[in-house]
Image: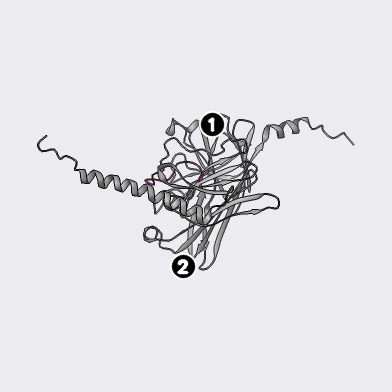
Amino acid sequence: MRGQARPSVSAARRSAVSAHRAVNVVASSVADLNKKHGIPGSVEFKEGKSGSPVVVLKHACGASAEMYLFGACVTSWKQPSGDEVLYVRPDAVFDKSKPISGGVPHCFPQFGPGAMQQHGFARNLDWAVSTTSADPNPDEKDPSVEVVLTESDYTLKMWPHKFKAVYTVSLHGEQLNLQLRVINTDDKPFDFTAALHTYIEVLEIAKAKVTGLKGLTYLCKAVDPKVPETKKEDRDAVTFTGYTDSVYLNSPAHVELEVGTGAAVALDSTGWEDTVVWNPHLTMKDCYQHFCCVENAKFGKAATVKPGESWTATVTMSVVDVSKLKHDLECTPEPAPM
């Protein structure tokens, strides 16, 4: 039709060549990663959704974990039975147009809203593979991968500091271990807040509950995240009947999320001083029933790192059988009177 541009053959060829090159770049990248860092049977790199590189950790016991290098986001942690522990939202995208919604996204160097973009920039960038290993420990191999993120023109515009973030993901048997180390490579100190925004799959949110938080002061961000209300937790277990967004300050090292199946996910941490509990309720009608976020955070008091020094935090996640524990406690006879 007159006045309507027709696509040229050369333009179509250029588009096809461009797409072919993109696929080849990813394939080459994955091949190079496997050649340099792959460990047969323990650490493997593959092409994930939208062509993004993924590292896969496999333990001899049958447990596995997967992490996208974009955002250093762990998107899968499976037990030897094949049961998935983490949750990825159905609206998650993997084309790098936005952070991956699910798994264990990073919040760094800012948790929540603030001077820069929501939850900072670490979840929006590609992390580089530093090392991998699968050392005997002592009789079986624990697969691990270490990735790093450093400053760039993009980050310096938001946060004017030179840094090196080192993130180590490993499997110890059925357990998932995560360690974040932030090194100050600048000539001046800097402050930051951070969190691991862990999404955990639950049978049904109404049956889920978080234990280990009773008696703590918490910031309720449900009404206004910028001006949270300070409250004290008086419940033995945090349950979910509506929108929940709470930051528990100075939380214990051990917290559990009972997922409604008789199992719980235990989070044992060091360095992370706070715990965030979040469920979007009806603001995400398509998926809120199926997950709960229990996040290890450094928020109530920002971390301060001097030049040449570092800050480190860890979390070990385990699946525990709470139904058996409760049964054993109920069946334990009371001690005979003296």
| Residue 205 badge | 1
Query: Residues in magenta?
Result: 94-104
Q: Residue furthest right?
A: 338
Residue 135 vs 88, above or below: the answer is below
Residue at point 70%, 53% (across, down): 138
Task: State whether residue 291 appears in this view.
Answer: yes
Residue 70 is left or right of residue 269, and the answer is left
State the residue at coordinates (53%, 43%): 198
The residue closer to the viewer here, 94 or 199, is 94
Q: Nearer the viewer, residue 172 or 106?
A: 172
Please tell me whether residue 308 is drawn above or below residue 193 in the rendered image.
below
* Residue 216 spot, x, y in % from top left: 60, 45
- Majority secondary structure in the magenta region: loop
Percent x, y for residue 114?
A: 41, 51
The reply, left or right, for residue 53 in relation to residue 337 is left
Q: Which residue is mark 2?
A: 186
Q: Position of residue 115 (x, y in %)?
A: 39, 54
Quadrant where the image shows the C terminus: top right
Label 1 is placed on what type of residue? Ile
